[in-house]
């Protein structure tokens, strides 16, 4: 799949791009089947990310590609890793993890503004995440991004439900700006999306999503990709997702060479 240079430039300038019709109808159906399998057979990292009194429900699960064949097929055989290689300008693309996210109809729970990378156990700048819905997503329920925010450094990660600093100690990282107070000042961008579309964004790009009003589900699937300079960064706290014991297998500062993180593309 040929990615235009202007799209690559936009990724590095804005920290996010949209790729329309990345997945075929058959691939969309495959992802949807994987999500339904995941919901029926939750993994050990499955969690409900909404309150009990929410009229809908927001659920997530991580790191299931080894047990859900639909996810494995999309990771290894779709064009997603090719797009990631082009956007990152990386000779190697390694899978970091998969992530399922489902907001049922009427879900009020917002996904607050955040960066992804501070929650992770990796360092480096050569990375991207893909987020692809299998249901139509209106502007009011889509992921939104603060353009260029990936170039502004690491910001304090907090728990989504109760705003606790569980990853970096209080005061060690700058706090997130109040983007909702002045959305124009933070160059907020987002797209209505159809099944088959995908957004690719840097792991430091600030993003969020509102709830899902009405009668429509918002089922989405994410893949996180590691490029050439990404290395292991063991933390003294529980990362999200957590890879328990990985510090005993991969030294700090070493490439993520492990069967949990397979190489998807290699141009060496």
Image (cartoon, helix red, strand yellow):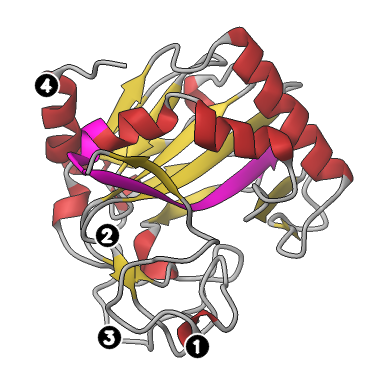
| Local SS, label 1 | helix
Q: Which residue is mark 4?
A: 5
CA distance for labels 3 and 1: 26 Å
Q: Secondary structure at mark 3?
A: loop
Distance from the alpha carbon under mark 1 to that under mark 4 = 40 Å
Q: Cα distance, mark 1 to mark 2? A: 36 Å
Distance of mark 2 from mark 3, alpha carbons?
15 Å
| Mark 4 or 3, nearer chain start | 4
Q: Are marks 2 and 3 in contact (CB under 8 Å)?
A: no
- CA gap between label 2 and label 4 equals 31 Å
Residue 51 quadrant: bottom right
Vertical relation: 40 (above or below) 30: below
Report the magenta residues as a range: 86-108
The answer to which image quadrant residue 175 occupies is bottom left
Quarter of image, res 233: bottom left
| Mark 2 vs 4, N-terminal side | 4
Q: Who is closer to the viewer here, 75 or 266?
A: 266
Q: Report x, y in % for residue 96.
A: 46, 55
* Rendered-image quadrant of the N terminus: top left
- Image point (56%, 48%), residue name: 98
On whether residue 94 falls in the magenta region, the answer is: yes
């Amino acid at each position: 799949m040929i990615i235009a240079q202007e799209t690559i430039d936009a990724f590095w300038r804005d920290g996010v791009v949209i790729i329309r019709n990345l997945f075929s109808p058959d691939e969309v159906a495959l992802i949807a089947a994987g999500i339904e399998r995941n919901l029926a057979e939750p993994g050990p990292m499955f969690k409900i990310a909404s309150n009990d009194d929410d009229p809908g429900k927001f659920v997530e699960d991580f790191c299931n590609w080894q047990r859900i064949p639909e996810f494995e097929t999309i990771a290894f055989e779709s064009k997603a890793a090719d797009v990631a290689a082009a956007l990152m300008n990386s000779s190697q693309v390694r899978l970091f993890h998969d992530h399922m996210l489902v907001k049922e109809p009427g879900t009020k729970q917002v996904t607050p503004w955040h960066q992804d990378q501070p929650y992770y156990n990796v360092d480096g700048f050569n990375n991207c995440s893909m987020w692809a819905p299998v249901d139509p997503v209106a502007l009011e329920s889509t992921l939104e991004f603060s353009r260029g925010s990936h170039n502004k450094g690491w910001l304090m990660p907090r728990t989504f439900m109760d705003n606790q600093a569980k990853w970096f100690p209080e005061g060690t990282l700058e706090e997130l700006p109040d983007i909702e107070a002045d959305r124009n000042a933070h160059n907020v961008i987002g797209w209505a999306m159809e099944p088959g579309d995908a957004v690719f964004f840097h792991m430091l790009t600030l993003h969020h999503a509102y709830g899902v009003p009405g009668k429509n589900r918002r089922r989405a699937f994410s893949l996180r990709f590691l490029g050439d300079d990404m290395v292991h960064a063991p933390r003294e706290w529980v990362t999200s997702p957590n890879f328990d014991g990985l510090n005993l297998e991969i030294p700090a500062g070493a490439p993520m060479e492990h069967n949990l993180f397979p190489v998807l593309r290699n141009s060496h």
